[in-house]
C-alpha cells in the first residue's frame, strides 16, 4: 500500500482530504496527520510516507521549507501542495524545491483523486526503475565477485594483498575452506540439476560461493567449525548430493583437503581438480588424500565399503572384527595418532551416514564421543581410540535393531502437504521439513525421491516457482522483490535466476508479457 501523510493546520481541512478519496481503491492508506511544519518533518522521518498532501501555509515552518527539508532525506517522496488562489508564487517555488504538483483551495475531490492517481503511476514507474537498477547492480556485483574469486583460484594474486576486497565482497577471511569441484556429464551444465545442487549446498553452507567454469560447478565451502566438524558436514553434503541429484548418473566430483587460510585457495583448487580423473572413472565424488596417507591406507587395506557391506547384511560381529583388524595393523606399523584419528573419524562418518539413511539420527549424541576421540588423538594411544570407537559402533548397532521405519508413503504425502502450505517460509528446507515430520533428513530425502521421482529440494523450488507464476498471472503489476518475498526467497536476484533457469524467461520479462 502507498503511504500518505496529510499536513494542514485546520482540522476540518484534514478531515475533508481524508473523506474525499477512496483510499483502498487507489491502493493507498493514510498513515498520519500533522498540523504544522515541525510535526510534518518529525512524522515524515518516523513514518516514511510515499505521498505528502500539504497546505503551503502552515505554522512554524511553511510548506516551502518543509518540502526542501523532506526532499533532503526522502528524495522519492511525492509532495502535493494545497494552496489558495493568491499563493501561486509560493506554489511555483515549492515545485522548484521538489513538490510534484499543487491543487487550489477550496478542494475539488475529483481533482485530488486525479492527481493522486497520476502520482501513484509516477511512483510505480520510479519503483520499477529502482528495482531494475538494483537487480543490475546486484548482477554486476556478483560478476565482479566471481571474477575476483576466479583470479585467486588461478593463483594470479596474493590473497594477503586483498584483505579489503575480501571484506567488500563479504567473504569470510579467517574461516577454514574446502573446494568441491562437480563436473556434469554431457555437453553442458544441466540447469535444473545445478539449481537443485545450489539449494542443497546453501542449506548446509550459507557462506558457500558457487562458480561455473564450462560444465563444472566449483564450490568454495567456508566454515568456522572445527576441522572434524567441517569434514563431517562435507561428507554429509556429498552423500545428500548423491541421493538428490543422482550421482553417478549425472555428476561426479572431487573434494580438496580442508585448508586454514585463503592464501591456500589455489592449492585447494588443484587438489579438487587432481581427483576428477579418478572420480570420472568411478562415477562418484572422490576425496583428495596426501600421497603419504593414501599409500598408507592402501598398505593396511582400509576399505570403508567392506564395513558398509557388513552393516547392510547386519553382520555386526564382522564389522567389529574388521575394525579390530584395521587398528591391529595400525599398531603393528606404529602409525601416528593423527593417522589413527583420521581412520577412526572416517569410520564414524560412514557409520553415522548409514544410520541416517536408515532413519536414525544420532549425530547430536555423537558430539561428546567425537570430542573424546579428538582428545585421545593427542593424549591417548591407538588401543584407547579403538575401544572408544567400538563402544560407539555397538551403541549404534543396538539402535538399528530397535528402530522401526515409519511408513514411507505417508511421510512423503505429509512432506508434500507441508511444503505446499508453507512454501513462502524463507527457512523452508529439507532439514526443516524432516524436523516437522519427526524423521531424519537423509531418510526423508531417500524416500521422497523414490516415491516422487524428484528430490524434495527440487519439489520446494517447483512449488515456489509455480506460486510465483500464479501471482504474476493474477497481478501483472507485482514487483520482483514482492514476488521473491511472497514465495520464500530472501534474495530477488536468486529468485530471478531460479525462475529463468526453470522457465527459460526472466520474471521481469514474464511480467512485461502479461
Image (spheres, rainbow, N blue to C red):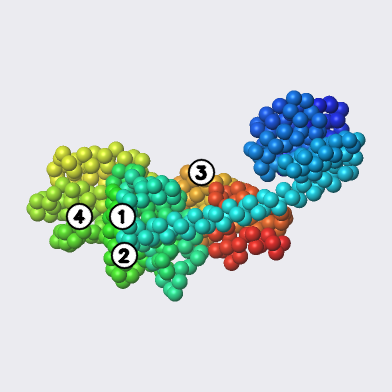
Q: CA distance from mark 2 to mark 1?
A: 20 Å
Task: Specify the label residue 436 is tagged with.
Answer: 3
For marks 2 and 4, the one nearer the N-term is 2
Task: Specify the label residue 158 is tagged with.
Answer: 1
Please rate how many residues cluster around mark 1, counting C-alpha atoms within 10 Å: few if below 14, some from 14 to 19, many from 20.
few
Q: CA distance from mark 4 to mark 3?
A: 38 Å
For marks 4 and 3, the one nearer the N-term is 4
| CB within 8 Å, label 1 to label 4 | no
Element type where label 2 sits in the image: helix
Number of the front mark, 3 or 2 = 2
Q: Toward the viewer: 209 or 82? A: 82
Q: CA distance from mark 1 to mark 3?
A: 46 Å
- The residue identified by callout 4 is 322
| Residue at horizontal 18 percent and vertical 48 percent from the top | 338
Task: Specify the label residue 273 is tagged with.
Answer: 2
Number of the front mark, 4 or 3 = 3
Amino acid at each position: 500500500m502507498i503511504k500518505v501523510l496529510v499536513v494542514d493546520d485546520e482540522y476540518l481541512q484534514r478531515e475533508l482530504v481524508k473523506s474525499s478519496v477512496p483510499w483502498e481503491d487507489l491502493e493507498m492508506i493514510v498513515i498520519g496527520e500533522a498540523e504544522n511544519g515541525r510535526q510534518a518533518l518529525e512524522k515524515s522521518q518516523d513514518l516514511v510516507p510515499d505521498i505528502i498532501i500539504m497546505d503551503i501555509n502552515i505554522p512554524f515552518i511553511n510548506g516551502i521549507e518543509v518540502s526542501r527539508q523532506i526532499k533532503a532525506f526522502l528524495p522519492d517522496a511525492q509532495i502535493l501542495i494545497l494552496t489558495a488562489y493568491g499563493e501561486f508564487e509560493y506554489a511555483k517555488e515549492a515545485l522548484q524545491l521538489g513538490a510534484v504538483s499543487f491543487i487550489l483551495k477550496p478542494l475539488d475531490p475529483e481533482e485530488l483523486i486525479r492527481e493522486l492517481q497520476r502520482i501513484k503511476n509516477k511512483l510505480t514507474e520510479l519503483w520499477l526503475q529502482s528495482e531494475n537498477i538494483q537487480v543490475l547492480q546486484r548482477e554486476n556485483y556478483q560478476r565482479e565477485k566471481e571474477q575476483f574469486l576466479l583470479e585467486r583460484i588461478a593463483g594470479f594474486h596474493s590473497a594477503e594483498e586483498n584483505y579489503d576486497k575480501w571484506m567488500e565482497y563479504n567473504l569470510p577471511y579467517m574461516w577454514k575452506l574446502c573446494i568441491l569441484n562437480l563436473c556434469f556429464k554431457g555437453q553442458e551444465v544441466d540447469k535444473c540439476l545445478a539449481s537443485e545442487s545450489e539449494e542443497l549446498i546453501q542449506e548446509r553452507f550459507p557462506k558457500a560461493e558457487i562458480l561455473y567454469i564450462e560444465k563444472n560447478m566449483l564450490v568454495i565451502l567456508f566454515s568456522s567449525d572445527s576441522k572434524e566438524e567441517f569434514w563431517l558436514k562435507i561428507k554429509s553434503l556429498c552423500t545428500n548430493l548423491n541421493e538428490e541429484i543422482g550421482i553417478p548418473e549425472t555428476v561426479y566430483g572431487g573434494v580438496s583437503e580442508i585448508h586454514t587460510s585463503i592464501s591456500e585457495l589455489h592449492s585447494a583448487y588443484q587438489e579438487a581438480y587432481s581427483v576428477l580423473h579418478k572420480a570420472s572413472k568411478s562415477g562418484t565424488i572422490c576425496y583428495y588424500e596426501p600421497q603419504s596417507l593414501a599409500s598408507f591406507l592402501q598398505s593396511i587395506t582400509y576399505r570403508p565399503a567392506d564395513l558398509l557391506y557388513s552393516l547392510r547384511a547386519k553382520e555386526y560381529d564382522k564389522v567389529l572384527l574388521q575394525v579390530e583388524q584395521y587398528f591391529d595393523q595400525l599398531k603393528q606399523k606404529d602409525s601416528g595418532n593423527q593417522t589413527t584419528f583420521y581412520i577412526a573419524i572416517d569410520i564414524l562418518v560412514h557409520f553415522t551416514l548409514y544410520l541416517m539413511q536408515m532413519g536414525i539420527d544420532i549425530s547430536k549424541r555423537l558430539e561428546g564421543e567425537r570430542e573424546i576421540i579428538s582428545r585421545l588423538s593427542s593424549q591417548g594411544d591407538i588401543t584407547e581410540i579403538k575401544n572408544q570407537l567400538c563402544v560407539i559402533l555397538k551403541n549404534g548397532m543396538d539402535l538399528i535393531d530397535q528402530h522401526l521405519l515409519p511408513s514411507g508413503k505417508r511421510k512423503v504425502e505429509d512432506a508434500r502437504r507441508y511444503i505446499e502450505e508453507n512454501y513462502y517460509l524463507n527457512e523452508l528446507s529439507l532439514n526443516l521439513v524432516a524436523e516437522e515430520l519427526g524423521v531424519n533428513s537423509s531418510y526423508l530425502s531417500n524416500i521422497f525421491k523414490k516415491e516422487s521421482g524428484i528430490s524434495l529440494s527440487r519439489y520446494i523450488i517447483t512449488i515456489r516457482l509455480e506460486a510465483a507464476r500464479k501471482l504474476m498471472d493474477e497481478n501483472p503489476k507485482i514487483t520482483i522483490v514482492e514476488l521473491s518475498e511472497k514465495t520464500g526467497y530472501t534474495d530477488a536476484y536468486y529468485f530471478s535466476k531460479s525462475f529463468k533457469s526453470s522457465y527459460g524467461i526472466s520474471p521481469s520479462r514474464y511480467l512485461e508479457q502479461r
